[in-house]
Amino acid sequence: MCGIAGIVELGAGRPDRAALASMVDVLKHRGPDERGTHAAGRCALGHVRLSIVDLATGQQPMCNEDRTLWIVFNGEIYNHVELRQELEAKGHRFRTRSDTEVIIHLYEEEGPACVRRMNGQWAFGLWDERRERLFLARDQAGITPLFYAPFESRLLFGSEAKSLLAYPGFPRRFDPRALDDVMTTWSTLPPRTAFEGIFELPPAHTLTLRDGRFVVKPYWQLEYRAATPGASEEALCDEVLDGLVDAARLRFQRADVPVGAYLSGGLDSTLIVSIVRRFTDAPLRTFSVRLEDQEFDEGAFQQEARAYLDVEHQEVLCRKQDIALSFPDVIWHAEKPVVRTAPAPMFLLSQRVRDAGFKVVLTGEGADEMFGGYDIFKEAKVRRLIAEHPDSRMRPLLLRALYPYLPGLQRQSPAYLEAFFLARPEDLRSPLFSHLPRFNLGARNRLFFSEAVKSALAEHDTLAEVAGALPAGFGGWDHLSQAQFLEATYLLPGYLLSSQGDRMIMAHGVEGRYPYLDQRIVELACKLPARLKLRVLNEKFVLKRAGGELIPDFLRRRPKQPFRAPEAASFFEPTTGQARAPYIEELLGESKLVEAGIFNPKPVRMLVEKARRGNAGSIRDGMALASILSTQLLVEQFVHRFGRLTA
Amino acid sequence: MTAGVKQAIRAYLVDTFLFGEGGDDLADDASLLEAGIIDSTGVLEVVAMLEGQYGIGVDDEELVPENFDSVERLVAFVQKKQSAKRGA
């Protein structure tokens, strides 16, 4: 991965090279190895490079033979070898071994439709000097970020919002709608970002600029269709395993630097490492993060996985104090509010990887979305079952099976359990049924908003926007597919792959590679029947079955546990009530709250007092505290000043 | 006594779960679950408060919405438990 930026002047002016330099410099963490810029005519392009493929000749910006097409590219095209062979057979001549050059020739051959042929994780900007046309594009899953902003008489783009904010005179204003979106769905709703005037190019979209106007449109979208009738379960399982083997192989082998892997102690990363161990002879180094709190730590499972896989393993311990101290950096990189502190341990983990001399790791994100792994899928199934079969005697058992790792829930009476998961008739009719409890939980924290923000958000309805953007075929999909779509469209790109993914891993110049998000795997998963994904309440059934001996027995037995980190206890020491870092006290204090104008100081003070007493341990309180502190950090680092806050 | 208990319980709920906001809109018979005021952790917090504040024990079978799901149900539950304690 790398960092890219660009300016296209729409009027008579020429791009400001010094401004481009500022836009590129602020992305240096994404590409510490090399830096390059190119300006000609009305366009200027910039690039910082994390050298992974074709170390000798892959410098950017890169052009075609007659220097009429220029590209800045961030990411990896895993099928670049096959595409190159195809293009060479058609007469294209290559000067480098890089995947970047493949895009140039593919664009020459197929125009904007070239993006449909690319399997990987990528974002790029391509300037066609002859036609004076800019073409921006982003990968299907939304692994690699890309932002754009019309500003005065030009269009700016960059890998991170801070690149655009670095343009001289660009207004730095927080958009409270983003906070509302994040509190509700954990993600901003693209193209909206946390900053007014800055837009995210949504996953699987392109932007074409010509004649001073730009058009943003999708080139692909998730579509759930059951496999052809008669396809046997065995054949589908074989197809999934074969696909995963190839996806892992491509991601492990197509690099000119050593590739490591994350090993979380769960099914997804273990299966990937197991595949690599089984099908290649190359040594493999694995990395994991441990949590100081027993409630969150998966160290015992990581050790079991390590022993089974026989890999050289390194771990980093994340203490609550580490979360407090790294949180300003986490938000500087995430560039949006977060409702959880879990990005912080991922930030520390990527630092550990980089310190060990690695630039690339395989990682297991995407499996839960594609193969039905999340608790929210089970919860929706149980809620629907209870609502539709009110006389079932299985109800208390099913409810208690949902969240074995939440002690508060396990202690509840059957009557309360049913009350918690009760689905009203109008909920059952909602297209967002599966996610309503989560969405409503977060939305309740609106009570912390200031009167000014409440008033500004009077017309804003995140859930109506989500419901209004559902694809035409959504109503015809099975219930699990509908829930998977919501998860893969919002939480995956908007939080897991960004705030907890790309932004944390690239903060230290490390590239994450995601075999489960191989385009072929995604499309295959979309045609699997629901029973192969969530069989009764057995999640990721197809992976467990297809994985066979590649998966150690303990992973079939262990209860699934989401990756979490402590929230309130990370910011306030519960025995003394002291904040763990001075910035926490300051940013949650009345003066800074009033200055930012986003939150009402009175309820925030009561929440803080609750946290000091060690009583803010509920999911909702933790989310409120993380949202408020992350928003305050965002405003402090991007609006009041433009630079990192030291913890 | 009822008024005092009701006031104390209401103040506790508003401070702890609504952070002082919107308490005036909370009707005595409003479902705390439906209003989104209490979740699974919240119920246990209320139990701890009742046990600490009023010295009453809450058995597992008593942990049901009929006893906990509104201000007035909580007040009735506290009174019932206190009467039972006095009568014991």
Image (cartoon, rainbow, N blue to C red):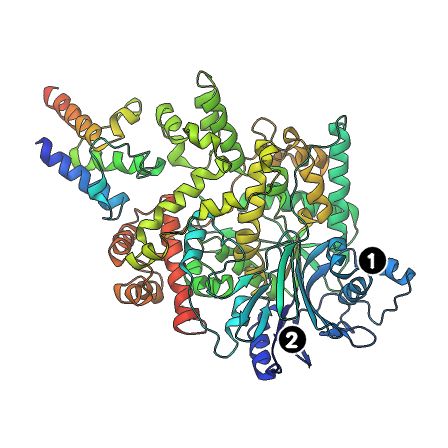
Q: Nearer the viewer, residue A616 or A147?
A: A147
How much space separates mark 2 and mark 1, taking CA atoms? 26 Å
Image coordinates of residue A598 in percent, x first then y, are 34, 60
Residue ranking furthest to the front: A211
Residue A206 lies, with reference to residue A185, above or below; the image says below
Mark 1 = which residue?
Answer: A83
Q: In which quarter of the image is residue B42?
A: top left
Image coordinates of residue A190 in percent, x first then y, are 53, 55
Query: From the viewer's perspective, is A237 left or right of B71?
Result: right
Q: Which of A356 and A268 is in front in this view?
A: A268
Image coordinates of residue A260 in percent, x first then y, are 67, 57
Q: Which chain carries label 2?
A: A
Q: Which chain carries label 1?
A: A
Image coordinates of residue A571 in percent, x first then y, are 36, 57
Q: Which residue is drawn at 28% across and 53% down?
A: A612
Query: What numbered label is drawn on residue A117?
Result: none
Residue A527 lies, with reference to residue A591, above or below; the image says above
